[in-house]
Amino acid sequence: MTIFKIPLELYQQNFQFGEQKIMKINHFFIGVFLLLSSIGYTQQPIILNSMEDEVHLYDHISIYYHNDWKKIPIDTIINIHTKGEFYKPKNQRLYIQPQSRTMLLHFRIKNTTTTDIPTYLTLSNSYLNYGKVYYLSKQDTTALKEISFYQNFPFRSVNYRHPAWKINIPTAEMVEVFLEVVDNETRTRLDLKLETEQHFFRKIELEYLRTGLFIGFLLILIFALSIFGSIQKEYSIFFYCLYIILVCIEYLAAKGIGIQFLWWEQPFIIKNMRSMSQCLAFISAGCFYIYFYNYTKKTKWIQYFFIGSVLIVSLVLGLYLYKYLFGGLVRLYVYVWALLQVLVIIFVVLHAILGYRKVLPYYLGIAFSLPIIGILIQLFSNPSVYDPKLYIWVLSNLFYIGVTIEIIVVTYFILSSVIRSQLRYNTLKKEANVLKINFQEQILHTRIEAENNMVNDVHDSFGSNLAILKMSLLSLKEKEVTTAQLDHIETVLDNFNKEYRYILNSKFSPTINSESLISQIKNLVKKLDELSTTKITSDIQFSGKYLDELNCLSIYKIISELLTNGIKHAKAEHILLAVNQKSKTISIQAKDDGVGFNTKKQNSGSFGLKSLKERVKLLSGDMEIDSKINKGTTITIALPYEQ
């Protein structure tokens, strides 16, 4: 604190006094000013009766606006007040419009106690361009340290984030206080408080406690989301974590805490941190929207709009680099805020569309609109300085209250979405395991049935031939062998060999690919035609290109079973196999002139047809059976074919 004397250049032009005489004149003018003030001005002083008094400042304040935007010396201020040009405002509002004018405020404090009372005058405006306090007592005029947010920081005089001045009120004296405020903003917060030391420090503790709880809560959310995103490998969540971090930085910048504790030595950051952090927060949130949402074809354009908006704001952010390197662009933050407000309102509308399209829940769009509503209410409302403190605090922090609710709701959406996806994945995995087990059981059952069928085939063919051969040999045991008997034995052995080769060829699965499929089918038809009494002909109009090995083998097995069933069960004399391609379909048809069967009876579900149906089903095909007793059977199979 420094002692400021009334400027004496005017008097020194005509009088040459010594230092002692100058001090006497100084005290004389102060005494005359206090006398005239007490006679000609009816403003009531603020009475301090104890160290714990809570002072209501606005009941005792008077204001004067100077049309020029410049600092005014104290002697001019005293002269203006002496002329009675200060006035008591009616219905004083929290926000004023200085319009590049210098504003002077005046009030009186009277100490009625027997001890000096230290008081603190605070102006809740962290980004005030200029502020200075003078107070006049009987002894002298005291000029307190001038404050500005970008140079003479508030906390350098009083350890507080807002402009604050300590005024010591002497015992049983009345002090005249003048506050000079210069601000070039279109809307300035004039939230003045005069508090005793005890109230002042209690308020600081409460404010920093609230800030600590708010930042701590957001950091807990960041930690929880980071761990959750890492475990679930949802890395787009980290964009939202970055968004929350930038919200914390913007909050510290807006409340003056960042300047006080973090970046007070960086002039560029002091002047641009708020708008830069808002740009970065917008980019982070936009990246989260781009990568986390599951867009449909009808909402894909919204994703493209998010991408374009992020790119635009990224380019705007590059202007800050230009400003850092070359200077200028003093009012850049005004245009940045205007751009961000427009884009954020559009984002809210787009979230409403996503909610309408069932891409997002409706509550998410409501949550995103809360900060915008908070900003609009703050911009268009101007509470009275006499409104309740809680109401003013809530109104002043509506944006951050809305952001907090938005972050909580989005965090809930992220956690519920990922948990719901995980539960859906677990359910599908469980169902897949059940299907796998059922499929394995079905394969095992089919394999057992196939093995039993093969045993029956071997018994019917090999067994009967072996029995005949045994009986023929036993009949020759004690007799002479005739030519007819030898011919009979030779016929039995030939039949045995044919049956053996037939079973081998019908059950054999060669290595097949798209190039060898047609030749293998023709080879199969040729061998079965040679080994059976049934005449088999084929008409193949199909290249087999672009088929993988699994599909080639499946088609081969289907044709093999068709021909085998016709030979064994139909007792046909002729079988015609036709394979061709129609559009995107492979058509396989086997037509015989055998005994036929009733498709409505159980034998239509025999093992041969059942196995055939399962193979066709695995290839997503269709099978039709047309059969009548003694009129043959036609089986037509259609399989999908993508070139």
Image (tube, helix red, strand yellow):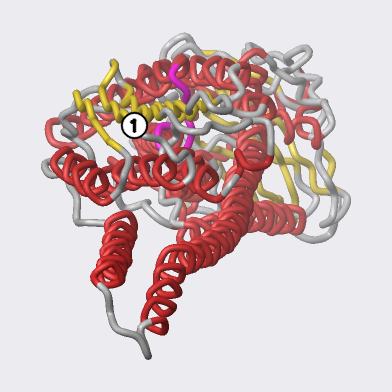
Q: Residues within 10 Å of mark 1 (few under 14, many from 20)?
A: some
| Residue 193 belongs to magenta span | no
Residue shown at 34% from the left, 29% from the top? 588
Looking at the image, residue 474 sits to the left or right of residue 370; the answer is: left
Most extreme residue toward the top, as rendered? Answer: 67
Residue shown at 51% from the left, 65% from the top? 456
Report x, y in % for residue 275.
Answer: 39, 32
Q: Is residue 118 visible?
A: yes
| Residue 291 belongs to magenta span | yes
Residue shown at 72% from the left, 42% from the top? 194
Most extreme residue toward the bottom, as rendered? Answer: 478
Give the quadrant of the C terminus.
top left
Residue shown at 51% from the left, 23% from the top? 631
Report x, y in % for residue 601.
Answer: 69, 36
What residue span does the magenta drawing correspond to?
Answer: 290-297
In-front residue for pair 378/596: 596
Amino acid type at mark 1: His
Looking at the image, residue 49 sits to the left or right of residue 218; the answer is: right
Report x, y in % for residue 219.
Answer: 55, 57
Looking at the image, residue 641 sits to the left or right of residue 132; the answer is: left
Q: Is residue 458 above or below residue 634?
A: below
Q: Is residue 513 above or below residue 640?
A: below
Q: Which residue is mark 1?
A: 574
Q: Is residue 231 visible?
A: no
* Quarter-of-image position of residue 46: top right
In-front residue for pair 94/207: 207
Q: Is residue 523 above or below residue 297?
A: below
Report x, y in % for residue 202.
Answer: 74, 57
In-front residue for pair 156/81: 156
Q: Helix, strand or loop at disc 1? A: strand
In-front residue for pair 11/478: 478
